[in-house]
Image (cartoon, grey):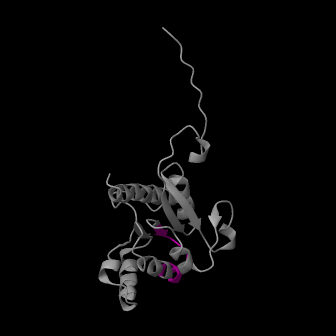
Amino acid sequence: GGRVELKFQIINTRSECPDLPSPSLSPLYVFGAGHVGQALAYALAPLPFSLHLFDNRDQYIRGQVLSYGDPAKTVQTAPANTAFLIMTHDHSLDYELCRAVLSRDDYSFLGLIGSKTKRARFLSRLKQDGITGAQRARLTCPIGLMTIKGKEPEIIAASVAAQLLQVLGKNNGN
């Protein structure tokens, strides 16, 4: 016999959990706060990432979404070991961001939303722009675990979050 009382409290972010140990947070820059970017931010909220969500469209600049002027400069000023996800509304902006990340050698991951066709086009252009084969090989596109199927933003977000945990866990020796 006995009695147990439980109290449940909804917690939306890690900052609302002061009693939990704070793990080392991996910096993550996500460019694009559209449907997938927003779903991804929600999926990543309780996970060990220091999320920076960027968009340059006025309708998305609110709350925790940051604006950026020069995309290349934003990439250049990111801390070492940052993971980058690129999912903007504009292919030319995606390309500019990819090129800027690939020009660094101290990032942990680069993921680009898109198809195998988009990947092939980007790799060809990157080669023409002098990005080496070793640098180009670090581009992950499409993103997400290939075993998780679905086109819905929430499914894509869950798949990408799982991929980040896998990849960054390996990079940290886990």
The region drawn magenta spans: 84-95
Residue under the point 60% across and 39% down: 10
On the image, the x and y values in percent for residue 96 come to 50, 82
Residue under the point 34% across and 61% down: 146
On the image, the x and y values in percent for residue 131 come to 37, 85
In the picture shown, does residue 54 fall above or below 51? below
Q: On the image, which quarter does residue 148 sit in?
A: bottom left
* Residue in the foreground of this view, choosing between 77 and 124: 77
Residue under the point 41% across and 59% down: 164
* Residue in the foreground of this view, choosing between 25 and 11: 25
Residue under the point 38% across and 78% down: 119
* Residue in the foreground of this view, choosing between 130 and 81: 81
Q: Does the magenta portion include 131?
A: no
On the image, the x and y values in percent for residue 27 come to 49, 61
In the picture shown, does residue 119 fall above or below 37? below
In the picture shown, does residue 106 fall above or below 18? below
